[in-house]
Amino acid sequence: MLRRKAYDSLLEWKNQNGKKALCIIGARQIGKTTLVREFGAKEYEHFVEINFVTDPMAQEIFSGSLDAERILTNLTAYVQKEMVPGKTLVLFDEIQECPEVRTAIKFLVEDGRFDYIESGSLLGVRYKEIRSYPVGFEEIFYMYPMDFEEYLWANNVQEKTVLYLKDCYEKRISVSESVHHTMLQLFYSYIVVGGMPDVVQTYVDTNDIGKVVKLQRDILELYRLDIAKYASGSDKIKIQSVFDSIPAQLNEKNRRFMLSKIDKNGRQNRYAEGFRWLEDAGVALPCYNVTEPQPPLQLNEKHNLFKLFLNDTGLLCAACMENVQFSLLKGDLSINLGSILENIMAQQLRCNGFHLHYFDSKKYGEIDFVLQKGSKLCLLEVKSGNDFKKHAAMNRVCDVNQWKIDEAVVFCKGNVERTGKIIYFPWYFIMFFKPDSIPQNLKFTVDISQL
């Protein structure tokens, strides 16, 4: 069984007092159901699973009145399994097929007899079908494909090696050359394999890149079928066009998504729903331009200027590399890796908890990513070649005194190094690059004795 960080998040949820239902949102094929099944088997005495795709008749459980007593009577009669209060986890899977679940979950949580996890792949795109959201009774948890650290675990990299690398990252010291070389090879393999669990497991078991690519293309086709099935009639063609054009758009020099590339007469507002659909489905990751690199970045977003990344680098390679994956794994770096490396960084940054932004202006040039870490701001550049110390735009932005850039990082094939304001990290260190954690037990009291 592949080790996932999300398991620890589920444990934290289970141990809460007065917990809500947990709603896991993420794209298809990222391992949501497998994770919950493992969690239910290990952490509960009893586990019940209802899948509304494989068992559409289960929707009848939620027909009629949605009071807890009636639902639980229907549920226990339907599953015909023992359900012990306080010791049972119930998984409602593929709940996009039964929107009434999210309306009813409020009453089930209030009842309190069992713990509930909801899971679905297209929850964000079917929100209009839900009569009433369970505000205050549902905790949202976003899940993504396996990140690079999880990929290392799958490939049996020792924990002490990961801890050694993390120590080098935190202390800003070079990685030994032998470890650095091996880590680069693993990173190249991650570029090709990506983080879809079935794909990773196939690679670990067989090392067969042909099988890997076939699985990836099957997943891409599944995404296209989802568009045909779930998108509204007038938007299907637009969404399909946007999805299919992502690899080519990323291969452009500035990576920016240009609507004119797919529709010369297209208007942004006519395609906005398509962009949003792919984001809500977990398939695409938007990265918005900001007017200036200053916090709060989300208030500076330009929603008409953005890059659109795929949710998984392996899928991107399968969509655009035309069977040159094996050459890359053998060390042939003549392939243009710029767009692929930028995608892999976007994928890992989003998984780490960052909102994605970039900066581009005629005066200063383009910065690949501008990230907010608390009240601090970080510039991040991704370099694919040997000239990774050339970053004129980053230098110009760092020199603007009123912007007060706190950190400037270049991710490259080189080892750890610092030159002036710029620190250079090897690509694989992206797994440790995370937002500042929210302080625990942060309390603030106003003294009103003088009022």
Image (tube, rainbow, N blue to C red):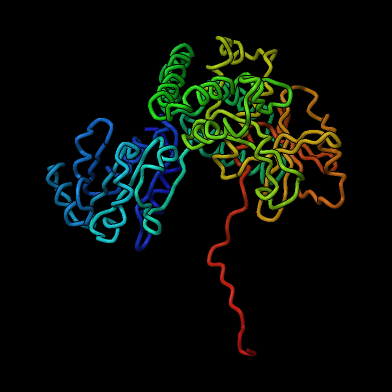
Quarter of the view holding residue 15: bottom left
Q: Residue at x 86, y 36 (%)?
A: 363
Q: Nearer the viewer, residue 211 or 123?
A: 123
Q: Nearer the viewer, residue 80 or 421?
A: 80
Question: Is residue 356 in sight in this rendering?
Answer: yes
Q: Position of residue 41 (x, y in %)?
A: 27, 42
For the N terminus, the image quarter is: top left
Quarter of the view holding residue 163: top right
Q: Vertical placement of 390 versus 262: above or below? A: below
Q: Residue at x 61, y 42 (%)?
A: 432
Q: Residue at x 15, y 47 (%)?
A: 74
Q: Vertical placement of 74 versus 112: above or below? A: above
Q: Residue at x 66, y 34 (%)?
A: 306
Q: Position of residue 92 (x, y in %)?
A: 29, 42
Q: Position of residue 2 (x, y in %)?
A: 40, 33
For the C terminus, the image quarter is: bottom right
